[in-house]
Image (cartoon, grey):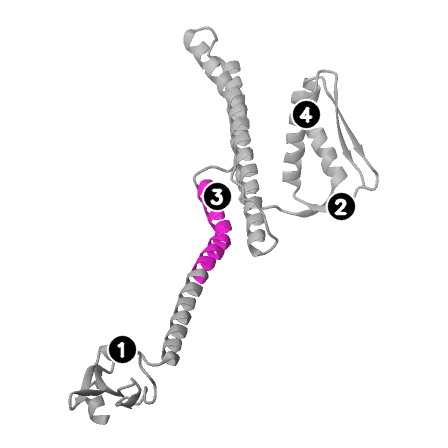
Amino acid sequence: SDMWAMMGLRVVVMDARGQVIGDSADLLTGHTLAAAQLAAGIPIRVNGQTVGTVIGASLAEPIAASPAGAFLREVNRSILLAVLAAGVVALALGALFFFQLTAPIRRLTAAAHAIAAGDLSQRVTVRSGDELGELADAFNTMAANLTASEEQRRQLVADVAHELRTPLSVMQANLEAMQDGILPTDAEQLASLHEETLLLSRLVADLRLLSLAEAGQLKLDLTESDLGDLVSRAAERLRPATVAKAVDLVTEITPDSRRVPVDSDRFAQVIGNLVDNALRHTPRGGQIALAVGW
């Protein structure tokens, strides 16, 4: 058998009944092969009578044996089919789970690309309370904040255009009238134009302060000050403007007004802006009240 194995061959010898009486691989000895398998071999004849059969094959070529061998082959075949079927099912389930897990991420990515392209109305549906759900909720909050910021920016641009249009229109009209000889180019007209340029300068300064405040770079000089005194001084400074428009400016300050850290200049500017806006919408004979209380 060692010799046959070294040559890569296998020899099986059977008697007249098909029972294996010798196997160089020592696998089928004692087993009985089927007639179809015997027909594939070379008969052994003695005095013209068949007394056995010899089958030669390579070691890599299996030789079917008894029903036990056939059963083993069927078992192996069944196991192979089961493994293949399990592999197919596992791949299908894995692909399904993969698409289910990545679907929220794909939706979030698509919404992010849409927002980057300028579509701030994009939102994602929050369907779970896990990390993906928290991420989707944070994304929706971010998108809402971006939408609010964009609306504020548009409103700011509209307000700035409205505020700048009036003094520019006045200056343009006066200059054109001077060029046409309708208005004289005297000190009074130049003073009027100067007032309009001062208004424009104030508007530009307000825009700069607003941009610094939104960027978090507005520096405040905080000092302990009495709010009542600050409001009173601001009211006295603004009173000539209210008197000129026949509007009464009153202050309501409690005696126990507190001292708080505040930038007095910025505070006076805020009061001035509030009173200026109130003057625009208060009819003649009306009243504007500044109150400080606790």
Pointer 4 residue: 278
Instruction: Tell me the residue that label 3 is attached to.
Output: 111
Instruction: Name which residue lies at 54% across and 31% down.
Output: 156
Q: Is 39 positioned to the left or the right of 29 in the image? A: left
Residue receiving disc 2:
259
Give the alpha-carbon distance from disc 1 to disc 4, as whole Å: 112 Å
Considering the whole magenta stretch, tell me its main secondary structure: helix
Q: Residue at (65%, 21%) from the top-left corner?
A: 280
Q: How many angstroms separate mark 3 from mark 4 (CA)?
A: 43 Å
Q: CA distance from mark 4 to mark 2?
A: 26 Å
- The amino acid on which the numbered mark 4 sits, given as a three-letter code, is Ala
Nearer the viewer's eye, disc 4 or disc 2? 4
Disc 2 or 1, which lies upstream in sequence? 1
Amino acid type, label 1 = Gln
Q: Which mark is residue 49?
A: none
In the image, residue 130 sits, relative to residue 152, either above or below, namely: below
> Mark 1 against mark 4, which lies toward the viewer?
1
User: In the rendered structure, which disc, 3 or 4, sits on the residue that comes first in sequence?
Assistant: 3
**Which numbered disc flags the more N-terminal residue, 3 or 1?**
1
Q: Badges 3 and 4: C-beta atoms under 8 Å apart?
A: no
* N-terminal-most mark, 3 or 2: 3
Residue 217 coordinates in the image, percent (x, y): 54, 46
Task: Give the residue displayed 54% in from the left and 24% down from the top.
Answer: 163
Is residue 113 highlighted in magenta? yes
First in sequence, mark 4 or 2: give its number: 2
Q: Which mark is residue 37?
A: 1
Q: Which residues are magenta?
A: 90-116
Mark 4 in CB contact with mark 2 (< 8 angstroms): no
Q: Separation of disc 3 and disc 2 at Cα?
A: 50 Å
